[in-house]
Amino acid sequence: MIIKSPYVTEKVTGMIDANNSIEFLVDMKATKTEVRRALVELYDVEITSVRTMITPGGDKKAVVKMTRAGAANELATRLGLL
């Protein structure tokens, strides 16, 4: 499984509205293309960009920017984050 879970902090909740992006914890070996493909299949969303980073705790995060305005807010609501 490539997508482990949504990553929610106070900063991420601000990013949902301000940048139209949302963060997910992903498998350590997942590539940006695999993350994009998995999110499109799971949630049927259009994605502009995927950035990945490894946290100091050893987890891998993906910051996903949505194409359509308000799409990150809708996805967060569907996931029960907001």
Image (spheres, rainbow, N blue to C red):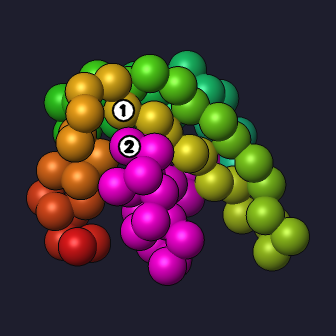
Callout 2: helix, strand or loop? Answer: loop
Q: Which mark's residue is nearer the viewer, 1 or 2?
A: 2
Q: Spatial distance from mark 1 to mark 2, Cα to Cα?
A: 6 Å
Q: Residue at x 44, y 65 (%)?
A: 14
Counting from the top left corner in percent of width and height, residue 28 is at 70, 49
Q: Residue at x 45, y 35 (%)?
A: 65
> Mark 2 — residue?
20
Q: Answer whether residue 59 is magenta in the image.
A: no
Magenta residues, as a range? 1-27
**In this picture, residue 17 sits left or right of residue 64:** left
Q: Residue at x 42, y 52 (%)?
A: 18
Q: Residue at x 52, y 25 (%)?
A: 49
Counting from the top left corner in percent of width and height, residue 37 is at 40, 23
The quarter holding residue 59 reads bottom right
- CB atoms at circles 1 and 2 under 8 Å apart? yes
Please state which of residues 54 and 1 is positioned toward the viewer in this rendering. 54
Counting from the top left corner in percent of width and height, residue 56 is at 86, 70
Q: Where is 8 relative to 1, above or below?
A: below
Which of pointers 1 and 2 lies earlier in the amino acid sequence? 2
**In this picture, residue 66 sits left or right of residue 42:** right
